[in-house]
Image: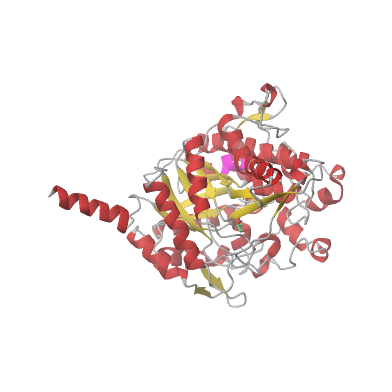
Amino acid sequence: MLYYRTSMYLRCILLERVFPDGFLWGTAISSFQAEMGAGEPSDKTDWWAWVNDETNVSVERVSGDTPLDGPGFWELYDEDLRLAREDLKNNSIRLAVDWGRVFPESTHDVEVKVKKDLWNNVWKVELEEDDIKALDRVADHDAVERYREILKCALSYGLTPMLTLYHWPIPLWLHDPIACRDDMASTDRRGWISQSTIVEFAKLTAYLSHELGDLVDLYCTVNEPRIVSEHGYLTRRGEFPPGLNDPSLFLICLKHLCIAHGVAYEQVKRWDRSEASPLGPSTVGLVAVLQHYEPADPSNPDDAWMSQFIDYAFNEWNLNAVFHGDYDMNLDQVVEPWEQLPHQVKGCDYIGVNYYAKWRVKHRKTGVNPLLDYEFAPCRDDCSDYGWEIYPEGLRNVLSWAYRRYRRPIYVTENGVADVGDKLRTRYLRSHLDEVYKSISLDGVPVKGYYYWTLMDNFEWSDGYRISFGLYNVDRETKKRTPTEAVPVYREIAEKNSL
Ligand code: BGC
């Protein structure tokens, strides 16, 4: 009997590779990338201005594609959520709210109590019931109602929603990306460079958790602080708003997004009191993009140093800030007393890990600033359409690194491949899930869910529609969704809760 039980157990664990009970299987989408295409545009954000700017198109910062050709989730959400549940057999979906839809007009006039720390950083933003009422007078109620319908629809299909509060576009009243690109001094609408954006974000997150909290228990505060900061402020191509290349702005943006996480964490905990599921009223985490970095030439000490430095600046920095209050502003990897802001540690219930690829790092030696001295070697083999090197083992590495270091449960909040010809996706999905499985069963990492990026082809930011990450391809004219080869594979895995 004992033998029988043990062998069944081993079979389950080792052969069938069963995931833990309650594991969340999903896909991730974001508002700006997925919502437009079948009706109402969202045209009040910096991203809208950015991709429609003629200069940006002519110098190829952006593709020239329009989000208006997107999959149209804003109108077609029922169909997509049905696919997620009935076709993919998922039990969760990660989606985002568009700040510019909820507050197309400024919330500056809603006066709230803001406390700053000794270094003049925003530290606490305190809202009262009356402030929520005042925000309600400014909000676009149709947009809020639509988000409620979308969330109710997800729940009615049996999909636990994971809601991202910030997945990149900011209202134009807070960020004029064209003015910032041309001359930041000419505008006070400076997006995340300005601390007032943190205060307004606190208002947004308080209001959303008050309005949507009965339908949501699982929140992501900020999606990928590093990508917003790097692609906006440390970029040679200038592809994200405002397209600058200035290491000090990169660090200011990163710092403010980490503080914004903490401020939003406190708002959600304060304002979401109702339970939508057994998860409890609110589980709130940061979504970090964690990639695998290694030296392009391992025998070259400069490449080795640069690879470690990039790993520190890009993977570690934002988590050290959120979990330890370490704001190493000169990136010397030593946190001086004045760089320690323990009072900014507000909480982070889980880590959302977005993992895509391996990057081989080279040192360029301009000698100006290490942040301007790195370069990624071109992908050699097993490359996605983006030229990102497929490396499933890297996912296991970052999962166990993040867990060992920060000791929080983890959701893989994004993982996917740019693959227009549908040649890589199935293998990518299986091989990465295999690594997630190993990380749970062999490394003891509490991974609670996995979200494939993305449900259907969408607007891939500055690259528009040339890039296809979707499990379903979308006809841009008819909006018809067509499954890729990975769909039946993912369906079977999610349905059986095993690989
Ligand atoms: C972002 C997505 C994006 C994906 C692929 C992630 O960094 O969160 O919005 O589409 O990468 O580039």
Horizontal placement of 424 versus 463: left or right? left
Front residue of this view, candidates 26 and 11: 11
Picture layout, residue 482 above or below residue 312: below
Picture layout, residue 345 above or below residue 305: above
> Which residue is farthest bottom?
478
In percent of width and height, residue 136 lies at 60, 44
Tag count: 0
Q: Would residue 259 be counted in the magenta stretch?
A: no
Identify which residue is drawn at 87% across, 47% down. Answer: 183
In percent of width and height, residue 191 lies at 74, 44
Q: Where, quadrant-wise, is the C terminus in this rendering? A: bottom left
Identify which residue is drawn at 82% across, 48% down. Answer: 180
In percent of width and height, residue 60 lies at 79, 64
Picture layout, residue 259 above or below residue 498: above
Residue 185 visible to an observer of this rendering = yes
Magenta region, main secondary structure = helix
Horizontal placement of 493 versus 137: left or right? left
User: Which span is picked out in magenta?
Assistant: 203-208
- Dividing the image into four quarters, tell me where ligand 1 lies: bottom right
> Which residue is farthest left?
1
Residue 284 visible to an observer of this rendering = no
Q: Would residue 206 be counted in the magenta stretch?
A: yes
Identify which residue is drawn at 40% across, 57% down. Answer: 91
Identify which residue is drawn at 64% across, 61% down. Answer: 379
* Colour mode of the rendering: secondary structure
In percent of width and height, residue 240 lies at 73, 54
Front residue of this view, candidates 259 and 305: 305
